[in-house]
Image (cartoon, helix red, strand yellow):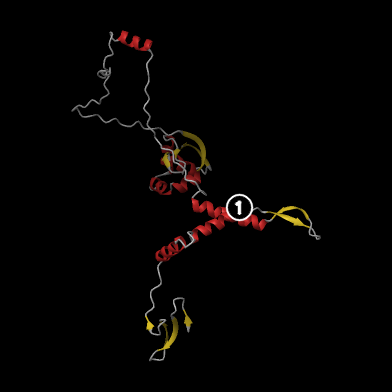
């Protein structure tokens, strides 16, 4: 059994099924339903009412707390230092008193809102009206140029017409397509292996040498020039390569396209 502050008690009661539960018994001896605990807002309101309640002497708990905190913040941390004979030999700062005084001062400043003073934000994009007084000699010169009166500004006039017209001419006549100019590949002369050219162009060599005599190949080779690509594929001069192969030559001079 536990006695509560309001005079009621809590007891462990055995249920019919053998289990136990905690029940609240009021001060008059009867079981009663336990009230729900107060919320945070209710607790804060009750605490504020308690500390601000004015007592018979005209003060309140809050005033006494503030007076004691302010008194602690004003404590002098310096204390007399005595020797073994009990004679004062000087003064020293007590760090415990200094820490307590600083902590009390922080509490007072936070409670008063002075710990972090509110910063005034300067208004941006301020608009100021300035009255500019024109010197008399400048005003007289302006009036002189405008015929004695200050005339209203009528604008800069119409925009000037450009001296040229940037336009595209459209006609119904069909346009003649312009053929692109072929770019000639730059060739260089170099000695090339005959066996390499025969291997790369084997199918074409078999086709040209099939059913013809060696004299025919040698005659056709006199009318050709040898030209090949960098990978060895022949552009022209197949019979020259065949003639060099017949004569067992290892290399042959050829133009190689870049």
At x 35%, y 12%, the residue is 139
Q: Quadrant of residue 34?
A: bottom left
Helix or strand or loop: what does disc 1 sit on? loop
Residue 235 screen position, x and y as percent: 41, 39
Q: In this view of the protein, can residue 33 be seen by the observer?
A: yes
Judge by depth and name the residue closer to the eye, 36 or 15.
36
Camera-side residue of 179 and 148: 148
In the image, is residue 18 above or below residue 97? below
Q: Is residue 105 above or below residue 35?
A: above
Q: Position of residue 164 (x, y in %)?
A: 27, 19
As drawn, the residue found furthest toward the right would be 85
Count of numbered labels shown in the rendering: 1
Q: Is residue 75 above or below residue 248?
A: below
Give the image location of residue 112, x and y in percent. 49, 51
User: Which of the 4 quarters of the picture holds residue 166?
Assistant: top left
Q: Residue lying farthest front?
A: 57
Q: According to the image, label 1 marks what residue?
A: 74
Residue 12, quarter of picture: bottom left
Mark 1 Cα shell of 10 Å, populated few (<14), some (14-19), many (≥20): some
Residue 56 falls left or right of residue 176? right
Q: Which residue is at 53% across, 56% downward?
A: 66
Identify the residue at horizontal 73%, vertical 55% (top origin).
80
Residue furthest left in the image = 172
- Closer to the camera, 131 or 184? 131
Is residue 215 among the parts visible in the rendering? no
**Residue 185 vs residue 245, the one in the foreground:** 185
Query: Residue 93: x percent and y percent?
Result: 69, 53
């Amino acid at each position: 059994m536990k006695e509560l502050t309001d005079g009621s008690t809590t007891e462990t009661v055995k249920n019919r099924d053998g289990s136990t539960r905690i029940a609240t018994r009021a001060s008059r001896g009867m079981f009663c339903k336990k009230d729900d605990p107060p919320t945070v807002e209710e607790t804060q309101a009750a605490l504020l009412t308690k500390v601000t309640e004015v007592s018979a002497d005209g003060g309140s708990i809050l005033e006494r707390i503030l007076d004691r905190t302010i008194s602690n913040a004003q404590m002098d941390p310096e204390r007399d230092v005595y020797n073994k004979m009990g004679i004062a030999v000087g003064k020293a700062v007590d760090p415990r008193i200094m820490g307590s005084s600083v902590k009390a001062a922080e509490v007072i400043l936070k409670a008063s809102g002075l710990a972090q003073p509110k910063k005034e934000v300067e208004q941006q994009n301020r608009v100021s009206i300035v009255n500019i007084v024109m010197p008399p000699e400048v005003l007289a010169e302006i009036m002189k140029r405008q015929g004695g009166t200050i005339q209203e500004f009528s604008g800069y006039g119409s925009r000037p017409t450009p001296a040229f017209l940037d336009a595209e001419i459209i006609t119904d006549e069909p346009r003649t397509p312009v053929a692109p100019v072929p770019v000639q590949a730059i060739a260089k002369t170099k000695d090339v292996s005959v066996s390499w050219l025969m291997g790369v162009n084997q199918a074409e060599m078999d086709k040209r040498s099939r059913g013809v005599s060696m004299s025919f190949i040698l005659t056709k080779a006199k009318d050709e020039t040898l030209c090949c690509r960098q990978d060895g594929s022949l552009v022209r001069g197949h019979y020259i390569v065949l003639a060099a192969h017949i004569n067992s030559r290892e290399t042959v001079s050829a133009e190689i396209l870049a």
